[in-house]
């Protein structure tokens, strides 16, 4: 079994509540990177897709408002998962 490092990300909502997420993968779409995150400890199969904005000192994550981009990134993620299962 591979020893993979698990990356955790803490995000704050509009009300200042922190939620811990596990980084599932990063997907390239139209020359941009999108991260797939899953909340730690959630029973349901919920994931969040955020755009990665490279910064000089620190990268930022930005909400994706465009449903077409969300669908395309999710489709690429599913394809990646299917390819790793083969």
Image: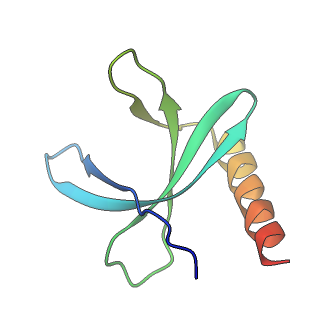
Residue drawn at x 58%, y 41% is 34
Depicted 7 relative to depicted 51: above or below: below
Residue visible at 44% across and 62% down in the picture = 5
Seen at 50% across and 34% down, the residue is 52
> Residue 69: x and y, percent?
68, 40
Q: Taking 37 as reference, is 10 left or right?
A: left
Q: x and y percent of residue 74 in the render? A: 68, 55
Give the quarter of the figure containing the N terminus: bottom right
Q: Residue 66, percent across and down? A: 62, 37
Residue extending farthest to the top is 56
Q: Nearer the viewer, residue 52 or 69?
A: 52
Q: Which quadrant of the view contains residue 29?
A: top right
Residue in front for this viewpoint, 59 or 73: 59
Q: Please give left or right for residue 50 compared with residue 15 in the image.
A: right
- The structure residue drawn at horizontal position 80% and vertical position 71%, both measured from the top left corner, is 82
Q: Percent from the top left, x then y, of residue 10? A: 26, 52
Question: Quick one: quadrant of the C terminus?
Answer: bottom right
Colour pattern of the rendering = rainbow
């Amino acid at each position: 079994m591979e020893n993979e490092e698990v990356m955790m990300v803490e995000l704050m909502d509009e009300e200042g509540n922190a939620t811990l997420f596990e980084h599932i993968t990063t997907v390239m779409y139209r020359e941009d990177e999108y991260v797939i995150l899953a909340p730690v400890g959630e029973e349901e199969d919920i994931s969040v897709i955020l755009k990665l904005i490279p910064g000089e000192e620190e990268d930022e994550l930005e909400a994706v408002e465009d449903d077409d981009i969300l669908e395309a990134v999710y489709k690429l993620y599913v394809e990646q998962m299917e390819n790793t299962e083969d």
